[in-house]
Image: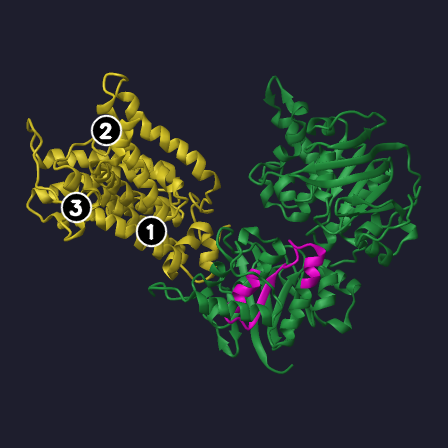
Chain colours: A yellow, B green
Amino acid sequence: MSALFDILASAGLWAAVLRIATPLILATLGALISERAGVLNLGIEGIMTFGAMSGWLAVFNGADLWVGLLVAALGGAMFGLLHSVLTVTLGLSQHVSGLGVTLFASSFAYYVFRLMVPVAGTPPTIEPFRPLNIPALSDLPFFGPAFFTQTAPTYLAIGLAIALAYLIARTPVGLAIRMTGENPHAAEAQGLNPMAIRYGAVIFGSALMGVGGAFLTLSAFNSFFPTMVQGRGWICIALVVFASWKPERALLGAILFALFDAFQLRLQTVLSGVVPYQIFLMIPYLLSIAALAVMARRARVPQALMQPYRRGER
Amino acid sequence: MTDIVLDIRNVSKRFGDNLANDDISLSLGKGEIAALLGENGAGKTTLMSILFGHYVPDTGSVSVMGQTLPPGKPRAAIRAGVGMVHQHFSLAPNLTVLENVMTGTESLWSFGSNVSAGRKKLIEISQRFGLKVDPDARLGDLSVGEQQRVEILKALYNDARILVLDEPTAVLTKLEAETLFSTLKDMARQGLSLIFISHKLDEVMATADRIVVLRGGRQVAERKVGDTSKAELAELMVGRKVTRPVREASTPGEVVLEAAGITVRSGGVDRLKAIDFRLRAGEVLGIIGVSGNGQAVLAQLLSGTIGRSAGDLVLFGKGGGDLTVADAVSSGIGRIPEDRNRDGAIGEMAIWENAVLERLPEFSKGGLVDRKAGIAFATRIIEGFDVRGGSPTSRIRLLSGGNMQKLILGRNLIEHPKILLAAQPARGLDEGAVAAVHERILEARKAGTAVLLISEDLDEVMALADRIQAIVGGRLSPSVNAEDVDAQRLGLMMAGEWEGATDAV
């Protein structure tokens, strides 16, 4: 029992939690805003992969790390545009289109990667983001190493979650997005353009997914390999439901999931040999399902989610 | 007429072969209530969609306060002060009342939303017109009548001077409708101009100053309310004389269905409280009451979709357990559900499929659906019950309300059921269809069917029922003979005043 407590009390655990949570926060926010406007974007897994690749590739070719993030955002936005054309303009099934985007974007990412980077024994690396040293805060005992030794994108992700929470709850554009996700006909009756709002939300959301993916190659790690997103996109789709479509809860959910994950990593070392480590790999997912079952039962789904909007039709 | 606020000039609109509006002109004065009266498909909604900019007219123009509106621009109509209250509300159930009202009223790029100013304006309007509503309530938690209030407030919040209401009472209970009309009159007194679309003669006569009658896309008459009568309007609207059928005397047969002290408890509440009634062959028993007093549960009980908690249900002299839906069908209980779109028909399925669905075993051969027999059956119903506007293979959604109801009636009556359970059978139907439905119900009664009529329409119950019981808060009054009561006494019964009354025989 004391072993478990020791894990929780180590600053390293909490530093890892924020690091693991960052891509989840970004991509969950992206999926969330798009769903708030009524469009499910299952392209997330592929868009994250493409973001991870394109951001890394830009930096590998000499660009600044921040430019890398921007390239990843643009790459994500491009696939968001594709998903919007298919689901908003053409009104196709959002599930099918999203899965198509995922398959296409991840293969395309690998294709471009192989085209640009010759096969080598060890994958080529870049110089990733360094932890940000915040005067005073970073030097605090325990809290310093636990919470204030992150890289800049992590703080960006947390700030973004708060900003989006404000945007959705308090601004006219947030209300317009929510109305479009609840009842696009009502939005139009009030003089808004639901098609344009959906395009905007999907493209912006996809850009965030791209940035989320790029965090993996530009901060958490320093090279790209095609399977590195490892189902994080699907976790984000579940986190949106867990968060009841609220950005502030998405932040919480991502951190909670990251905590499970960081915890099991350390548990593996403590209990190695007693139980097969694969058991621990399952833990975050099992706990996520349990948390989802508890939290999501009272969630209010956007009423027009997954319903194509056609003008003049009811 | 003094100030003309709205002037519709020579508007025509064609959809394919169908001339939906044929050279229609209409003007509206300040503070006036005009009714647009017509059957379904007369072109009322098309005309109002042109006014609101949803459709572009082929010819003609619309001007508001002397300014001609650009065709096909809803935004311009809103800005000119035209507000539209749609029959199907344009509201989001998960958002609050205030959010529904404020959507799209502020610049999308402003950094914050002035919620407190919005709330103040909403409360002001709601007090001024007596439209009471809680700005922070979630819309989905409101009743249909309250949601309509929000829809009206939304238009007023956009500074509407002309309010168009498309069949505003179609979804309301009688009580809610009365409240609505007194609000509308109050708005007119305060200088707003209103047009409401309707096919209900009573409400048109009671509310409007002026009545414009449309039939088949043409404007057939315009009358001041003082210069006309219900009978004349009905004739103008339908194009021929419509008379509702009259109930002939009959001798009821034996008791086919008896409820003794039935209580139904669901969700921790007694929805029906120890109710008693007896239904005999060849009679119509009317259950009258304001919606939401247990009618729906009573209908579910007899359709076999909900069970009893206490009491006995005796069917054809045999008591026993709860009915199942299959029991109800096989023992000859025909059912006309209250909400035909939700419980009576599956919109996207063909008419013939809807006709045979509840008796599928009769229409299957070797495990497959006998399509040919099904279509033949549907054809018989269509011909026998005068269902217009669709073939057996077209989707039932495309039928008008009246024709869908005729099909549902036909599906039940064609095999001469022993019991017919009719819940609000004429709700939302136009005058011609009401007469047709009533006629069929009386025919069934003559043929020996026992009819349980659940309705909140006094005229309907008094015209059709032999005996009447009122339902209030899940309790059922003793029955009275229709001959012995007048509207006033029934009104009292609907309010729960039946002390000392005993069952009529």
Q: Earlier in the sequence, mark 2 or mark 3?
A: 3
Q: Which residues are magenta?
A: B150-179
- Asked where in the image residue B458 lies, by quadrant, the reply is bottom right
User: Looking at the picture, do discs 3 and 1 lie on one chain?
Assistant: yes
- Please say whether residue B383 is visible from this viewpoint: no
Q: Nearer the viewer, mark 2 or mark 3?
A: 2
Amino acid at circle 3: Thr
At a point 68% along the width and 52% down the height, the residue shown is: B428
* Residue B24 image offset from top left, x and y in percent: 60, 68
Residues under labels 3 and 1: Cα distance? 27 Å
* Residue A228 image offset from top left, x and y in percent: 20, 32
At a point 68% along the width and 63% down the height, the residue shown is: B179
Q: Which mark is residue B202?
A: none
User: How busy is the neighbourhood of tag 2: few (under 14 within 10 Å), some, or many (20 plus)?
Assistant: some
- Please say whether residue B176 is visible from this viewpoint: yes
- Asked where in the image residue B266 lies, by quadrant, the reply is top right
Residues under labels 1 and 2: Cα distance? 38 Å
Q: Which residue is mark 3?
A: A151
Q: Examine the structure image and report whether residue B172 is included in the region drawn in magenta.
A: yes
At a point 35% along the width and 56% down the height, the residue shown is: A166
Q: Nearer the viewer, residue A298 or A194?
A: A298
Q: Which residue is mark 2?
A: A266
- Asked where in the image residue B350 lies, by quadrant, the reply is top right
* Residue B85 image offset from top left, x and y in percent: 56, 61
Secondary element type, mark 2:
helix
